Image (tube, rainbow, N blue to C red):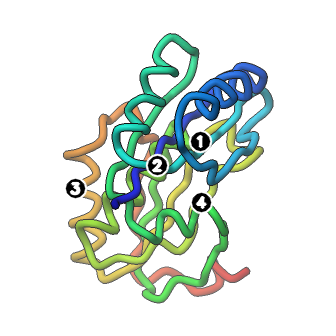
């Protein structure tokens, strides 16, 4: 059985918890993450089979939220959600993708990990970013450029604030 994810960014914390309660009483899904991403916004990640995640989307349709579904999610994305650890990049070349919503950063991470030999070494999405997501990738330049091209083809422009590629980044930038 493959895992699908529901990434939901609610514009109201109380509405988010109310909706989550409704989902959990209706569907056999697992909570992977509940956190405030900015004052007044709640980020929830649920896992389950694809049909149950589709049903989550239907429950959330008339609610003021942003919903993103990821099917057959890459294990590294689940690890980023559960453990949220930042690493030193393996490669010197780095790509940084800034998204308008944190849910889009996870979708992009999954897309990159499924299509290229790159490393996601950091994903920021907590308080202070006002609901944005910032994804950090490392790899050889051709793979990073290929990932950026794939992102631009697959993700709407209005969801991406900025993409920067830093060739041979100074190692001091990403030290813990």
Q: Earlier in the sequence, mark 3 or mark 2?
A: 2
Q: Earlier in the sequence, mark 1 or mark 4?
A: 4
- Other residues around mark 4 within 10 Å, as few (<14) / some (14–19) / many (≥20): some
> Which residue is at the front of the view, 105 or 20?
20
**Marks 2,1: beta carbons within 8 A:** no
The image position of residue 111, as x and y in percent, is: 31, 58
> Which residue is at the front of the view, 160 or 108?
108
The image position of residue 31, as x and y in percent, is: 63, 48
Residue corresponding to mark 3: 150
Q: Secondary structure at mark 1?
A: loop
**Marks 4,2: beta carbons within 8 A:** no
Q: CA distance from mark 2 to mark 1?
A: 25 Å
Residue 16 to residue 147: above or below? above
Q: Secondary structure at mark 2?
A: strand
- Other residues around mark 2 within 10 Å, as few (<14) / some (14–19) / many (≥20): many
Residue corresponding to mark 1: 132
Residue corresponding to mark 4: 81
Q: CA distance from mark 3 to mark 1?
A: 20 Å
- Other residues around mark 3 within 10 Å, as few (<14) / some (14–19) / many (≥20): some
Q: Is residue 56 left or right of residue 114?
A: right
Q: CA distance from mark 4 to mark 3?
A: 22 Å
Q: Quadrant of the N terminus?
A: bottom left
Mark linked to residue 48 = 2
**Marks 1,4: beta carbons within 8 A:** no
Residue 73 to residue 90: above or below? above
Mark nearer the viewer, 4 or 2: 2
The image position of residue 101, as x and y in percent, is: 53, 37
> Which residue is at the front of the view, 48 or 148?
48
């Amino acid at each position: 059985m493959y895992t699908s994810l529901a990434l939901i960014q609610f514009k109201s914390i109380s509405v988010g918890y109310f909706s989550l309660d409704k989902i959990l009483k209706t569907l056999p899904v697992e909570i992977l993450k509940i956190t405030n991403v900015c004052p007044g916004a709640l980020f929830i990640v649920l896992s389950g089979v694809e049909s149950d995640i589709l049903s989550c989307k239907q429950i959330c349709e008339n609610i003021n939220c942003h919903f993103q579904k990821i099917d057959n999610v890459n294990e590294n994305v689940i690890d980023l959600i559960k453990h949220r650890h930042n690493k030193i990049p393996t490669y010197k070349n780095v790509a940084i993708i800034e998204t308008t919503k944190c849910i889009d950063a996870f979708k992009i991470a999954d897309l990159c990990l499924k299509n290229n030999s790159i490393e996601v070494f950091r994903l920021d999405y907590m308080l202070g970013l006002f609901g944005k997501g910032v994804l950090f990738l490392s790899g050889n330049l051709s793979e990073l450029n290929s990932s950026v091209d794939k992102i631009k083809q697959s993700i709407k422009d209005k969801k991406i604030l900025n993409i920067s590629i830093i060739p041979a980044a100074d190692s001091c930038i990403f030290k813990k």
